[in-house]
């Protein structure tokens, strides 16, 4: 096969209300894998970082003369794909244009109609994109690639039966292609934790999660597939030596499912005398934490962790399938906070069937916790989740007006619960006030925040949340 020109882009702009930016792990992984299989010239762009327009992105793709163009995106940014694919098609009529990422996993065939893409990949992308490139530059037959969504010559959208098997041994994947981006640009931007200017990389240490939360994506399946502890330490060591990285942010869905692996990872990193900090902005299930795991992580460098409560109502824990053990959740946080880990809680308000009593329990649980900060979101349903199907069954009218464009969870206004909009948003304001206007919590923040010199920047943000509603608010959090 001839040398191919591959252009991969993570589509989506940074916005004022949502500046967060992380390395695009999906396309970094695809690039790393594909270059072990084909002779490739690769350009990889994260639109969030470049903050360029779709016109500019399309121009770069056309100027590059791509043979294959892959767009990865979340649903919140998917509205950009229509124009973008059309502009690329005009400049490169013969290029293979492929869509992937969380949006495709949520909307499936629906992603094709508003774009002129040739194909879309649901779920894990490495094997599917490899097969697709082989087919396109081989016999041209897409019909044998399991699970692929594609456009036939007649313009018909076809979904092949079956699905490709998940990658069994994640360690067989190469390290993500960090050499294709300038990681230093990310150090100047706001990542997931409210801690700025870190020399960090993101690492995805596992794929898949066996829990059954009704709102959750299922991009990587329900089987937990971890990288080995040794591979993770090798990867971290590589980043430390190559880019002088001092901080590693794990983006797994559930980093601590296998406690033995976590402890092995920590022991190995310490034995190799690697000096780095650990942030877990997404990755922890706190009701399965124990003293030994917390101790090992803190000794290795853990200083920031997110803890997802979602709901303080035991009834909703069962209903939603999250099934968090709330007393153990509180204990897990206490273990971390007592060892100085700056802790960020996540809660979701407004589940289907949720009542004022449930909302109140969430507020009380968050307030009872030793969390330093918390975000109280309202529930947002994405297609191809049990949550979405449930609302479609019971209250389809609530989904009719739902728009995802550039939404962030802090600004959405969709109410799936049993209470009125006024009551729901009043509880959201109340949650922020009750949580943040607690002298003990304020003292804990002042004591433990890892970058005290930045408190003047972050404190007003939290204070604003806390006072919202006191002086009249617009219902947004
Ligand atoms: C890091 C992260 C972010 C980062 C940005 C990530 C990015 N790509 O730029 C930040 C912090 C900015 C972010 C923001 C949000 N996020 Co987010 N985020 C994540 C998280 C935790 C990890 C993503 C990741 O790196 N995964 C690991 C990589 C390896 O997987 P991947 O990107 O999915 O890539 C694989 C496949 O999807 C596929 N693939 C990916 N790209 C492509 C491209 C092609 C061409 C092909 C063929 C395949 C392909 O192959 C890859 C490798 O197998 C995921 C949860 C998760 N486990 O994925 C949520 C997740 C992606 N986020 C989600 C959501 C909802 C949001 C927010 C709306 C939430 C909010 N707080 O308001 C905002 C969006 C705001 C906005 N307006 O832009 C949802 C997306 C649902 C959806 N249908 O889009 C997810 C899935 C979590 C969930 N709740 O279900 N997020
Ligand atoms: S624990 Fe997290 S990753 Fe697992 S199903 Fe629930 S929300 Fe999804």
Image (cartoon, helix red, strand yellow):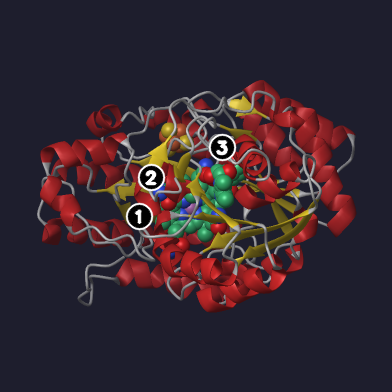
Q: How far across and down, in percent of the image, does residue 191 sit?
A: 59, 61
Residue wearing tag 3: 141
Q: Can residue 110 be seen by looking at this rendering?
A: yes
- Judged by depth in the image, the label closer to the viewer, 2 or 1, is 2
10 Å crowding of disc 2: few (<14), some (14-19), many (20+): some
Name the one closer to the observer, 190 or 339.
190
Q: Horizontally, is 117 left or right of 265 in the view?
A: left
Q: Horizontally, is 72 left or right of 61 in the view?
A: left
Q: Tell me if the residue at label 1 has its CB under 8 Å from ligand 1.
A: no
Q: Secondary structure at mark 3?
A: loop
In the figure, 134 relative to 281: above or below?
above
Q: Secondary structure at mark 1?
A: helix
- Which comes sooner in the sequence, label 2 or label 3? 3
- Judged by depth in the image, the label closer to the viewer, 2 or 3, is 3
Residue at (16, 41) in percent of width and height? 357
Q: Splitting the image into 4 quarters, where does residue 376 fall?
A: bottom left
Kindly report the distance in space between the C-alpha atoms of the residues bearing marks 1 and 3: 21 Å
Residue wearing tag 1: 113
In the figure, 119 relative to 141: above or below?
below
Q: How far across and down, in percent of the image, does residue 34 sit?
A: 73, 44
Residue wearing tag 2: 157
Name the one closer to the observer, 37 or 474.
37
Kindly report the distance in space between the C-alpha atoms of the residues bearing marks 2 and 3: 14 Å
- Which comes sooner in the sequence, label 1 or label 3? 1
- Judged by depth in the image, the label closer to the viewer, 1 or 3, is 3
């Amino acid at each position: 096969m001839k040398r191919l020109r591959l252009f991969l882009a993570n589509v989506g702009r940074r916005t004022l209300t949502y500046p967060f930016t992380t390395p695009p792990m999906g396309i970094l992984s695809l690039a790393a894998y594909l270059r072990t299989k084909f002779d490739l010239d690769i350009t990889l762009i994260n639109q969030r970082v470049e903050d360029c327009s779709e016109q500019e992105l399309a121009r770069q793709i056309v100027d590059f003369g791509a043979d294959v163009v892959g767009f990865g995106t979340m649903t919140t940014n998917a509205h950009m794909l229509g124009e973008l694919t059309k502009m690329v098609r005009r400049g490169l009529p013969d290029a293979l244009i492929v869509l992937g990422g969380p949006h495709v996993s949520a909307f499936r065939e629906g992603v094709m109609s508003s774009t002129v893409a040739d194909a879309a990949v649901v779920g894990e992308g490495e094997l599917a994109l490899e097969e697709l490139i082989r087919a396109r530059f081989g016999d041209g037959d897409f019909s044998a690639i399991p699970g692929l969504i594609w456009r036939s010559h007649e313009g018909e959208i076809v979904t092949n039966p079956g699905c490709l098997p998940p990658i069994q041994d994640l360690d067989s994947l190469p390290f993500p292609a960090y050499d294709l981006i300038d990681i230093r640009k990310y150090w100047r931007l706001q990542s997931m934790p409210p801690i700025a200017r870190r020399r960090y990389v993101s690492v995805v240490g596992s794929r898949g999660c066996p829990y059954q939360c009704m709102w959750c994506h299922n991009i990587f399946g329900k089987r937990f597939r971890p990288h080995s502890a040794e591979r993770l330490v090798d990867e971290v060591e590589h980043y430390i030596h190559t880019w002088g990285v001092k901080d590693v942010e794990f983006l797994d869905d559930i980093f601590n499912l296998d406690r033995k692996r976590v402890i092995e990872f920590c022991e190995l990193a310490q034995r190799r005398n690697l000096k780095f900090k650990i942030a877990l902005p997404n990755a922890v299930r706190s009701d399965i934490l124990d003293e030994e795991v917390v101790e090992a992580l803190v000794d290795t460098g853990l200083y920031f962790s997110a803890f997802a409560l979602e709901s303080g109502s035991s009834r909703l824990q069962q209903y939603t399938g999250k099934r968090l053990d709330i007393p153990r959740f509180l204990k897990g946080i206490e273990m971390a906070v007592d060892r100085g880990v700056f802790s960020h809680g996540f809660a979701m308000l407004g589940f289907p069937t949720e009542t004022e009593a449930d909302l109140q329990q969430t507020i009380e649980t968050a307030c009872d916790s030793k969390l330093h900060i918390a975000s109280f979101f309202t529930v947002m349903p994405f297609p191809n989740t049990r949550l979405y199907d449930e609302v479609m069954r019971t209250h389809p009218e609530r989904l009719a007006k739902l728009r995802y464009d550039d939404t962030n969870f802090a600004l959405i206004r969709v109410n799936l619960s049993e209470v009125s909009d006024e009551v729901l948003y009043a509880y959201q304001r109340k949650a922020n006030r009750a949580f943040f206007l607690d002298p003990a919590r304020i003292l804990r923040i002042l004591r433990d925040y890892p970058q005290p010199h930045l408190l003047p920047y972050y404190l007003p943000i939290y204070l604003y949340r806390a006072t919202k509603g006191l002086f009249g608010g617009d219902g947004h959090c």
